[in-house]
Amino acid sequence: MSTFFKRNISFLFVLLLTLSAWQKAAAQKKELCGFDARLKRQMASPQTAQQITAAGIEISRKQEVLKNLRQSRKNREVLPGPIYQIPVVVHVLYRPADATPGAPGTPNAYDDNSTDNPTDAAIYNMINLLNQVYAGQYASGGISTPIRFVLAKRTPDCNATTGIIRTAVTDSRYVDDGLQDGGTGPGMPEAELLALSKWPRNEYYNIWIVRRIGDGGTNGYAYFPNQSNEEDGTVLDARVVNGTALTLSHEIGHALALYHTFESKTDGNEELICPVNNNPNTDGDEVADTDPHKKSWDCFAANAINPCTNLVWGNSRTNIMSYFSCRDKFTPGQGDRLQATMLTERYSLISSLGGQAPSGTAVTAVDAKTTVSNPNNTFGMGPVLVKLNSLYYASEPYRSATKIAYEDKTCTMGTTLSKTGSYIIEVVTRSNRQRVKVWLDLNNDGVYTANELLGSSLPPSGGDYSGNYTHSIPVTAVQLSGATPLNTPLRMRVAADWPNPDYTYNAQLLYGQMEDFAVTITDAALPVTFGALDAVISNGMLKVNWTSESEVNNEKYLVQVSKDGKTFYTIGEQKTKAPSGNSGTAIPYTFETGMEGLTMAFAGLMLLAFCSFAGSRKRKRARILIMGFMVLALWGLSNSCNRNERVLLPAQQDGFFLRIGQVDKDGVTRYSKVIKIINE
């Protein structure tokens, strides 16, 4: 060995270690998210590709509806409408050597000694940051979505939980090399590792924290919505669970069907090639208001030129779904797609009770068979979707691979009905003609009697039932009035199987599946569930449109306006269209009035405000007299001007608000969200 080499061997060794560290750092910089690689592998399967494509089409349809409503009406919610709370479960998969949360991990050839087992506080901070981003509160100019995330409070079997599940993994493949990346190489395979701690994916969103993904260059990844994916969820490297990293916000975007903003629909080269953007609604990331760009990590100056648009950089450099270091917000178009995914492919998570503390009341059991007569059948029979009021549960039918003939979802999936209401149960089946039956244990005795069969559905013979078929079963107030006890969770059973022979509630099905849910019957009238609401001034007319998703004991609606969003004045009312005030289906409503109606309304508000000041009786009378003349003058002006088409009246200016009041037959009034009245 040469003298030179001997003298410098230590230096060379240190140099090699340094180069290795640089190489690792570069890999971490270049591979922040593993979503693209996993989506590519999924799309390589024709069946999975078909499912993901079909889900994407449904999401895009809903996205277009939401976008058109937002763009054409330009309404801005002032008070929040429905907030979708998504129960999440955080599974921490740690090595036995890292059993103490927050303690430094055991260093090895792949990583430093950062903790592999984050503390509860670090996880709380991560979820808080996630909610800030999705509420538009993380950065100036961020858009607010109605999506929030809450750690689960009940387990699938109705016990209390913190939503944080810690599991020691002793498998040497994981201890030494972490999670295998891409199905090859060192590490523990994904399916095996995640199966160690997993909750039902239609009732909880699973987040796994692992010690490392592959070679350590990937910070996290998530899967697109796909009902057949058993590994659906987000996987995070423990290093990014710190309350400051935006990795989870980014990955949840993928889970809600957002692509990267540099998405090109090609096999790589995103760093060199600009994405095709001929149709911004279908090309690239399929969101029209995100600028196309090359994949990059450094945050360009705001006045720099984006080579893919030849314009000054727009919103992509600060977009959560990019790799830029200054990313911090979503665009309105992305907000539409996020919400569209929640209202389609992820709707079951909205219905889940997993984010609520256990009620302490167990649902009375009813005998059920857990197998079918033909366990290896491949017909795909059973419910794939059950809808009733607020209950929305999507699932897979019976499959020979999983052999799930019965599911008890009474702890996490259910709804509340009024005994005076009327509803529609919708059950969707797929493939073959199937008989659907629904029972409800009205007297809570653990046995379904003849009067507790809510209904059945059998499609006509000879039809094509290879696709989805919706069975509609009406539920009447007469049926629900027999419920005893009230305000207690009762067991509802939904079954779907081969049409013949007919079957009973506790029979062993031939090929299909049974599912149980919790239904609570109350004697109190439930409020109307509001759907879409918009208000526009056009050609001298105020036009208000709203939808009720369901109505119980409803008498009428009040159309109310306000200048400050706090004090409202009724300018009209609309009687309910629901028969006897009860409906389980969506009903559209429209209200129109000339501008004189708004003029008089705001004049009335001014009169009330003017007369509310303290003063002598003579002064108050004088104020009332003056305001009376003002109201008459405004009324006369509006009438004369309305004969000559439009005029600029006070209510036609920006900054006025509207809400809908709903009045029950018992006189109780509830209100919709508050929106701005828009002048077209």
Image (cartoon, helix red, strand yellow):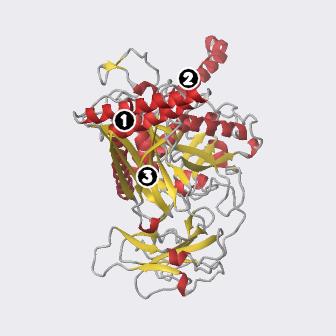
Marks 3 and 2, the one that precedes in the sequence: 2
Residue 139: image location, x then y, percent? 53, 27
Residue 411: image location, x then y, percent? 63, 64
Q: Dots 3 and 2: beta carbons under 8 Å?
A: no
Label 3 or label 2, whichever lies nearer to me, is: 3
Marks 1 and 2, the one that precedes in the sequence: 2
Look at label 3 and name its amino acid. Gly
Query: Which quadrant of the structure image shows residue 464?
Result: bottom left
Q: Residues within 10 Å of mark 1 (few under 14, many from 20)?
A: many
Q: CA distance from mark 1 to mark 3?
A: 19 Å
Q: Dots 1 and 3: beta carbons under 8 Å?
A: no
On the image, numbered disc 2 is attached to which residue? 22
Residue lying at 53% horizontally and 46% vertically, measured from the top left = 83
Check disc 3 and report its element: helix, strand or loop: strand
Check disc 1 and report its element: helix, strand or loop: strand
Classify the position of the C terminus by image quarter.
Answer: top left
Q: Nearer the viewer, residue 479 or 144?
A: 479
Q: Left or right of 234: which side holds 68?
A: left
**Which disc is residue 678 wearing?**
1
Q: Nearer the viewer, residue 446 or 397?
A: 446
Q: Is residue 13 visible?
A: yes
Residue 62: image location, x then y, percent? 37, 49
**Which disc is residue 531 wearing?**
3
